[in-house]
Image (cartoon, coloured by chain):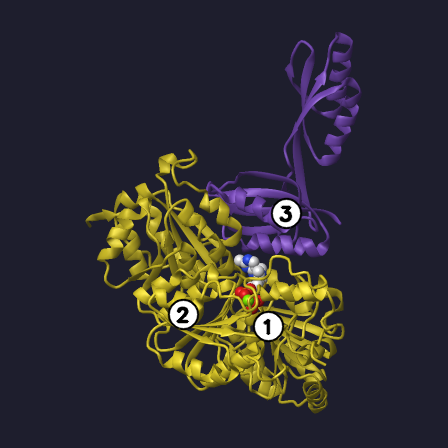
Amino acid sequence: MSKISGAEILVKSLCEEGVEVIFGYPGGVLLSLADKLYAEKSIRFILTRHEQGAVHAADGYARATGKVGVCLATSGPGATNLVTGIATANMDSVPMVAITGQVRSSLIGNDAFQEADIIGITRSITKHNYLVKDVKDLPRIVKEAFFIASTGRPGPVLIDLPVDVTLQQDEFKYPRTVDIRGYKPTYGGHIGQIKKIARAIEQKKKPLLYVGGGAIISGAAAEIVELSHKADIPVTMTFMGLGAFPADDPLSLGMLGMHGTAYANMAVQEADLIIAIGARFDDRVTGRIDTFAPNATIAHIDIDPTSVSKNVRVDIPVIGDAKTIIKELAAEVNKKDHIEWHRTIAKWKKEYPLKYKDDDQVHPQYVIETICDAVKDKDAVICSEVGQHQMWTAQFFKFAKPRTWISSGGLGTMGFGFPAAMGAKVGRPEAIVIDIAGDGSIQMNIQELATVVMERIPVKIFILNNGYLGMVRQWQELFYSRRYAFTPLSKEGATQCPDFVKLAESYGAKGIRVTDKSKVREAIDTALKEEGTVVVDFVISREENVFPMVPAGESIDKMIHGLA
Amino acid sequence: MGKFVLSALVENKFGVLARVAGLFSARGFNIDSLAVGETEDVTVSRMTIVVDADERTLEQVKKQLNKLIDVIRVQDLTGGRYVDRELIMIKVKAENTNIREKIVQIVDSTGAEIIDVAKKSVIVEETGDEHKIKALVELLRPYGIIEIARTGKIALQSETNGK
Ligand SMILES: Cc1ncc(C[n+]2csc(CCOP(=O)(O)OP(=O)(O)O)c2C)c(N)n1
Ligand SMILES: [Mg+2]
């Protein structure tokens, strides 16, 4: 066999893994790799305008498709620019392989030009990481990286590649199998434990499914519907779990937690059996932990043993893949109804619906409902940034299917949504991809407008422009006597800074401003009809709040309801 | 709270110690001691880790260790039969023959050893479990301890008869 360079070996390995797109940014140590990628026609390389854009795009691609997202950055500053995005993917269990260039092996540790210890820096925010020391290890490392990223509880894996390794020559032989003795994820659940849950469902009077992002990763949506319908169990979802169960199903209670529906939180506090599926009892869900679900037996189905009994004591743990386990559970459980329980919940739903003031102002919740209506029955992926607009979307958009909601849940990364939308659109070109943004967040990766325009990746950016870092302002209003320290982004009535319409136009995208409620639907329809990228600047009521709200550290039934 | 002895078999590769140590610091787990060395298989190292934790934290520590890709297996030795040893070296003042003799007596009666003799001090070495080592330190303290070096605990599970 003839020998080829490390750069070429990497490209061939990526082809073996079926990689179709890489989001990245070049640099000195990547020259040879870039040259080989340039020659490889089966892999599309998308040059972003910032490495953070690349890593979030790889993330959005992965969340939208379920495939491994790949990003590439140069050594030093390129690599450190990936950090936020890697941490974001790690928190939300997103399969990703991040490749960084590194200085020459012999210079590592010498404070060489553009050297950063990215292995050390990312150790705690990756599922695993590798420094390639020898070209002969490269194919195995790539194989392992994709395997680790995409199996078990998925997560980001980083490969740090010194420039001399890209130049070393070796024969190319891609391994067929992976054998990592310290990594053997469990998939099948313990049948005895599954039976225990089935019996509990039959005995208890107030069961509740609490469904998290793991259900979506596992592809368990259909099985959850089957279980819920057969055993007549209401379903609440975490922020990350939205889409795992259809919002318009009568058994759906919507989202629980800090900005969850009142009835979901009340159901949690009243339930006598909670079955957690791919959820991790995050503090934004549980509120004050010692008062969480006081009456419930807790069953927990999760592929990651560390999630079980970490925050809440679990009575019936089942380790394994949610889809497989729920399927077995649905088969095992006997048909059952919980009429009394549903009656109680129906009363709560009537008494405490999600609501907002619907007058002639442009209320953000109205905008979300109108977007939801405009894409109804269409294949649409909704991304978001972080803040109030994100929570209004989680509350008012009726997600019907998994992988239609892409947002940074665990880390809460402002600036995530737009590049993630770009990645999602690349992965699902036939879908409508929308980023619901805040006027603060969108400025964190606005430079990617150049990428989407140049690469013809049409996404629709709907900015809910309140002139504030609204979510922080809300906390200041409620808990810091309305002292708006460092949260105003613009002055009421003053000229907009930036003018998002002109900004869009300067990049060659279309810009639309909406200040009038009667123009909301029209603007959305125009944006969706337009072929290219469109930015719609919805100028919304400035001091709108997200309700209901559980103050941090409070018991989740201690909600502030807002509107009387 | 209590002390628990964990024995982890890990890949014998660079960076593994950093991963384990990083895990403890990032998650706020308390390590009492950590000792690493190669095993009968050169590709595998054994880490003996003594953690100070309550039962629930201990469970998390074990699971989190297991989750590291480079950790092959974690055993909790605490409940079962195991033997453990530490090694200590104590540099103690010995400025005249009288004191020197007394130290020799202590060393002989405890099974320790003098491994270095200098003009004004000697270095005593002892291997044993925590209690034995503590006793020796207390016996030597009155003479003036100059420095101590001590390994962490290493441990092995004993073979249980009949099982
Ligand atoms: C990178 C980053 N920095 C700071 C924060 C803290 N933070 C959370 S929400 C928010 C305000 C977001 O403002 P905007 O995007 O305008 O959304 P709004 O809440 O107004 O809808 C801030 C500053 C964060 N989540 N991420
Ligand atoms: Mg805002």
Q: Quadrant of ligand 1?
A: bottom right
Q: Which residue is mark 1?
A: A238
Residue at 70%, 35% (x, y): give it. Answer: B129
Residues packed near mark 1 inside 10 Å, few (<14), some (14 to 19) or many (20 plus): many
Q: Mark 3 near mark 2, Cβ–Cβ under 8 Å?
A: no
- SS type, badge 1: loop
> What x and y, as percent, mark residue B44?
49, 44
- SS type, badge 3: strand
Q: Which is more N-terminal, label 2 or label 1?
A: 1
- Of circles 1 and 2, the one toward us is 2
Q: Which circle marks residue A129 in the picture?
A: none
Q: Amino acid at mark 3?
A: Leu
Residue at 70%, 24% (x, y): give it. Answer: B112
Looking at mark 1, is its residue's CB closer than 8 Å to ligand 1? no
Any part of residue A386 in sight = no
Determine whether, in the image, residue A150 is placed left or right of residue A172: right
Residues packed near mark 2 inside 10 Å, few (<14), some (14 to 19) or many (20 plus): many
| Dot 3: chain letter | B
Q: Looking at the picture, tell me which residue is in the foreground, A548 or A93.
A: A548
Colour displayed for chain B in the image of the structure: purple
Residues packed near mark 3 inside 10 Å, few (<14), some (14 to 19) or many (20 plus): many
Q: Which circle marks residue B6 in the picture?
A: 3
> What x and y, as percent, mark residue A314?
68, 67
Determine whether, in the image, residue A386 is placed left or right of residue A199: left
Q: Quadrant of residue A493?
A: bottom right
Q: Amino acid at mark 2?
A: Ala
Q: Is residue B105 above or below residue A247?
A: above
Colour displayed for chain A in the image of the structure: yellow
Q: Mark 1 near mark 2, Cβ–Cβ under 8 Å?
A: no
Q: Quadrant of residue B132?
A: top right
Q: Which circle marks residue A424 in the picture?
A: 2
